[in-house]
Amino acid sequence: MTIKVVRGNPTPEELAAALAVVRARAAAAAAKPPGAPAPRDSWSDPSRIAARRLPQPGPSSWGRTYWPG
């Protein structure tokens, strides 16, 4: 793996910190077992939708079904 500084003049400490982050991310990606399911994105998480309270049954419940209150 080759890392090239394209812009700026980082100090040795800044360069070491950047390399530590890159190496830690690479080690974490390599440590994941093959065939493991990918983490779910919060956008597709059903609990995001189900967290809101559903309308209670009653005489006028048809008018407030799934409409924000």
Image (cartoon, grey):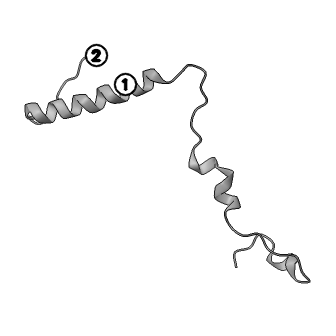
Q: Quadrant of residue 14?
A: top left
Say left or right for 3 vs 62.
left
Counting residues from the start of the chain, the first of labels 1 and 2 encountered is 2
Q: Amino acid at mark 2?
A: Met
SS category of the residue bearing label 2: loop
Q: Is residue 30 visible?
A: yes
| Residue type, label 1 | Ala
- Residue 4 occupies which quadrant of the picture? top left
Q: Specify the quadrant that holds the C terminus.
A: bottom right
The residue tagged with tag 1: helix, strand or loop? helix
Crowd tier of the residue under label 1, counting other residues whose Cα lies within 10 Å: few below 14, some 14–19, many 20 or above = few
Vertical relation: 19 (above or below) 48: above
Alpha-carbon neighbours of circle 2 within 10 Å: few (<14), some, or many (≥20)? few
Q: Residue furthest top?
A: 1
The residue wearing badge 2 is 1
**In the picture shown, does residue 64 fall above or below 24?**
below
> Residue visible at 9% across and 30% down?
12
Residue 6 spot, x, y in % from top left: 17, 30
Q: In this rendering, is residue 10 above or below 34?
A: below
Which residue corresponds to the image point at 64% horizontal and 57% vertical from the top-left? 48
* Residue 41 in the image, given as x and y percentages of width and height: 57, 44
Between 2 and 40, the one nearer to me in the picture = 40
Marks 1 and 2, how far apart at CA: 11 Å
Quadrant, the N terminus: top left
- The image shows a total of numbered marks equal to 2
Q: Is residue 7 visible?
A: no
Instruction: Determine which residue is flagged by label 1.
Output: 26
